[in-house]
Image (cartoon, helix red, strand yellow):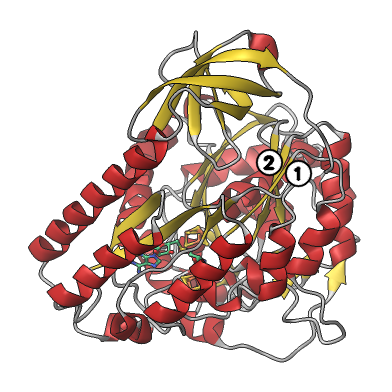
Amino acid sequence: MNEEQRLESQKVENANSSDKKSAKDYSKYFESVVTAPSLKDAKQRGKEEVKYHNDFAIPEEFRGMGNGRKFYIRTYGCQMNEHDTEVMAGIFMALGYEPTDRTEEAHVILLNTCAIRENAENKVFGELGHLKHLKVEKPDLLIGVCGCMSQEESVVNKILKTYNQVDMIFGTHNIHRLPNILKEAYMSKEMVIEVWSKEGDVIENLPKVRRGNIKGWVNIMYGCDKFCTYCIVPYTRGKERSRRKEEIIHEVRQLAAQGYQEITLLGQNVNAYGKDFDDSSYRLGDLMDELRMIDIPRIRFTTSHPRDFDDHLIEVLAKGGNLMNHIHLPVQSGSTEVLKIMARKYTREQYLELVRKIRVAIPDVALTTDIIVGYPNETEEQFEETMSLYQEVGFEAAYTYIYSPREGTPAAKMEDNVPLEVKKERLQRLNALVNESSADALKKYQDQIVEVLVEGASKNNPDVLAGYTNKSKLVNFVGPKTAIGKIVKVKITQTKTWSLNGDMIEEFEPAGVN
Ligand code: SAH
Ligand code: SF4
Ligand code: F3S
C-alpha cells in the first residue's frame, strides 16, 4: 500500500468513527497534535526579534496528498482573511488538490472565520450546522475551522462539545502548517487542533493563488498592538510584525509585471508599518513613496489608524499619481469621552485636526470610516457627537456597527448597559445620515466623466459591467466585455445612494507613473 492509499483507507476508517474525545483527553496520547488557544497568552507582547523565513517548501511526504481531491474555502471577515484564503488555496494546489465552488463536490471544506462581532461568529456556527448533512452523506469529507475564531478557547470548546462534524481547527499563525494538519486529520480519529497563541515568524514564500488577475492584496504587516478595548484582533492576530520593504516592493513589482491594475496594501493598522523595526526609521510614507514609482495604475491601503497617520505619509499621498485619493480612516466615535474608554488614544479635536491636514494637502480626497454605536455608557449626547462629527468631516461612506462584547477584551468586563432598542435606534439614525451623505457625494458625479477599473459583469445584471473609480465608487455601465481588466472612461448618467450608472465613452490606456 502506498502512502496515498494508506491515507485514503485511514481517512475512511477514521471518518466513520464518531467517538471524538475532547482535546484534553487526546493530548495525553499525542500532545503535539493538540495545541489549544489561550487569549491570555495571546495578549503577551514579547520583545523577541521577529525572524523572516524564505525557505517554505512542501515536504516530499505531502506531495500528491490532494491528487483526485477538491477543496472549498469559505471566507468570512476582513481583507486579511481574504488574503489568507489565497495563501491556503496556494498550499492546497501545491499539494495537488483542485478548487471547487460547490461544497457537495469538495473533499475538504475550510471555514476561514472572523471573530470581530458575535453575529460574525453565529454565521459560522450556522454554516457548520448546514454542513453536517454533507458529512453524513460523505463520511470521508474533512471539515476544518481556521481564522480568527479558532484563536478563542470558548469557540474551540464549543466546537468540541457540539460540532462533532469538525475534523480540524487551526489558527491564524498555523496556516503554513496546513499540509501537516491535513495529514494528521486524515490519519487521526480525533479532532486535530493546532492553534498557536503566540504569533510565529514571518514566512515570505508561501504559495498563493490569487482570486483575480486585476486587483491584488499585498500584506505589509501582520497583527495589531493597539488593543482598542472592544477589539479581539490583537488577540487573534498577534503582535505587530512588518514585512521587509524589499519583499513588499518585489511582490508589487511582480504583480505589476503580471498585469495587475490595482494593489491594496494590507494590515490591521498599516500606518504602524515599520514601528517594530529596531534598525530603521522607515515608515509607511517612505514605502508609499517607493511604491508609487512602480508602473501599476492604482495603489491603496487599508486600514489606517488615525493615531499613527504622520505628516510624511500625508505629504507622500499628496503626490497623487497612482496613490488613490480615498482614505479609509476609522473614527469609531465622535465623543472624546467614548474614544478614551475605547483606548483609541486620540480626541475628537485631534481627529478633526488630522482631517483638516489631509484635506489641505489632498483637497480632492474622499474619506470613509468605521463607527461603533452603543458602547458601554454611551449617552445620547455622546452619540449626537458622533452624528455631528460625521457631518463635520463630510464622510462619503461608513461601515457602522452595534457594539458587540468580545470575551477576553477589557470592554467585555464593562457593563453593556445601553439597551438593545436604543442601540438599534442609534444605528438607524446614523445609517440614515450615512445613506444621505453617500447619495449627496454621488450626486456631484452627474454628467461627469470618471475613470473606472472594470472588474467584470455587474452582480445584478450580466449585461452590464461594473468597476470602481479612484475614490472607490461603484459604477455600473454598458460597455464591451473587452473592457474588463482595463481602466476606462465612463460618463455618469444616473446617481444612486451607493452606486453610479453610466455609459462608457472610450477606452484608454492608463497614464502610468506620473
Ligand atoms: N484595524 C482596523 C479595524 C478592524 S475591525 C482599525 O482599527 O481601523 C473593523 C471594524 O470593526 C472596526 O473599525 C470597528 O468599527 C468594528 N469593530 C471591532 N470590534 C468591534 C466590536 N467588538 N463590536 C462592534 N464593532 C467592532
Ligand atoms: Fe482592533 Fe484597534 Fe487594532 Fe483596529 S487598531 S485592529 S480596532 S485593536
Ligand atoms: Fe475578523 Fe480577524 Fe479580520 S476578527 S475582521 S477576520 S482580523
Taking the image as shown, residue 372 lies to the left or right of residue 225, namely left
**Residue 258, image x, y percentages:** 85, 33
**Residue 311, image x, y percentages:** 67, 74
- Reply above or below: 64 against 372: above
Near-viewer residue (123 or 282): 282
- Reply above or below: 188 against 499: below
Kindly identify the amino acid type of the residue bearing the numbered disc 1. Answer: Lys
Q: Is residue 403 visible?
A: no
Kindly identify the amino acid type of the residue bearing the numbered disc 2. Answer: Ala
Q: Mark 1 or mark 2, which is nearer the start of the sequence?
A: 2
**Residue 446, image x, y percentages:** 43, 26
Near-viewer residue (183 or 381): 381
Point out the frontmost of discs 2 and 1: 1
Give the residue displayed 33% in from the left and 71% down from the top. Answer: 333
**Residue 409, image x, y percentages:** 38, 81
Taking the image as shown, residue 422 lies to the left or right of residue 116, namely left
Residue furthest bottom as drawn:
47
Q: Is residue 309 visible?
A: yes
Question: Is label 2 in contact with label 1 (beta carbons under 8 Å)?
Answer: yes
Distance Cα–Cα, label 2 vs label 1? 7 Å
* Circle 2 residue: 89
Q: Residues within 10 Å of mark 2 (few under 14, many from 20)?
A: many
* Circle 1 residue: 208
Tally of numbered tags: 2
